[in-house]
Amino acid sequence: MTYEFNPLLAGRAKHMTKRDVENVIASMDEPGPDDVILAIFALMDGSNFTASRERLHVAFHSLRQKYPGILSFLVFSTSESFPWSDQLEEILFHLSLYRAMAWDAPDYRTYTMSGKNKAIIRSSILPKIDPSTIKALPAVAIDLKAMLA
């Protein structure tokens, strides 16, 4: 089941009007790491991608090396069997919590991001990201999709 994107925690958002939510989104001038990762997922072709922790962490570790200026906020430990980033894990949790993407039950092997959610992200989050970063994000999304295929 895929939920409608909500940029706020679900518990708070249900007490806010649509206008309140729009005002909060408009006030978020500085995009954070969650926004950059969210934009990358929103720019990927298709609506489903793997939820395998190993594949996601290995892919983002490679992407961080290829695009250090964009993904410098991700710090990886390479002392385990595969690269691991606590920051990436936290971001994936947030994106599920915000309902930007669904972790598909019953086996939780894939994430799904609906076309509607992608459109909302492209219209409300992408414009807040630095233009030089936005220019590179489609290439990052293409590389990520290829790594997760």
Image (spheres, helix red, strand yellow):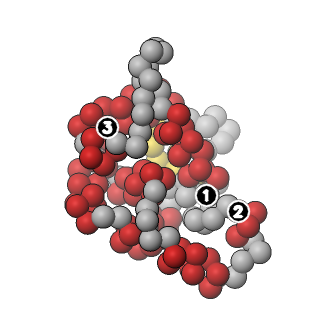
Residue type, numbered disc 2? Ala
Q: Estimate the x, y position of residue 119 in percent, counting from the top left.
A: 43, 69
Mark 2 lies on residue: 10
Q: Quadrant of residue 125?
A: bottom left
How far across and down, in percent of the image, does residue 9 sit?
Answer: 67, 61
Q: Quadrant of the C terminus?
A: top left
Q: Secondary structure at mark 1?
A: loop
| Residue mark closest to the camera, 2 vs 3 | 3
Mark 2 or mark 3: whose residue is earlier in sequence: 2
Residue 111 location (% of width, % of height): 53, 45
- Picture disc at residue 64: 3
Q: Amino acid at mark 3?
A: Arg
Between 76 and 92, the residue placed more toward the observer is 76
Give the crowd class for mark 2: few <14, some 14-19, many >=20 residues within 10 Å: few
The mark that comes first in sequence, 3 or 1, is 3
- Residue pictured at 31% horizontal, 37% vertical: 64
Q: Earlier in the sequence, mark 2 or mark 1?
A: 2
Label 3 crowding class (10 Å Cα cut-off): few <14, some 14-19, many 20+? some
Residue 133 percent coordinates (x, y):
27, 58
**Measuring 67% from the left and 38% from the top, which residue is drawn there?**
106
Residue 146 in view, yes or no? no
- Spatial CA span between label 3 and label 1: 25 Å
Task: Classify residue 62 as left or right of residue 89.
Answer: left
Question: What residue is shown at x 63% (from left), y 65% (from top)?
Answer: 8
Give the CA separation, mark 2 to mark 1: 8 Å
Q: Is residue 23 above or below residue 3?
A: below
Q: Secondary structure at mark 3?
A: helix
| Residue picked out by circle 1 | 99
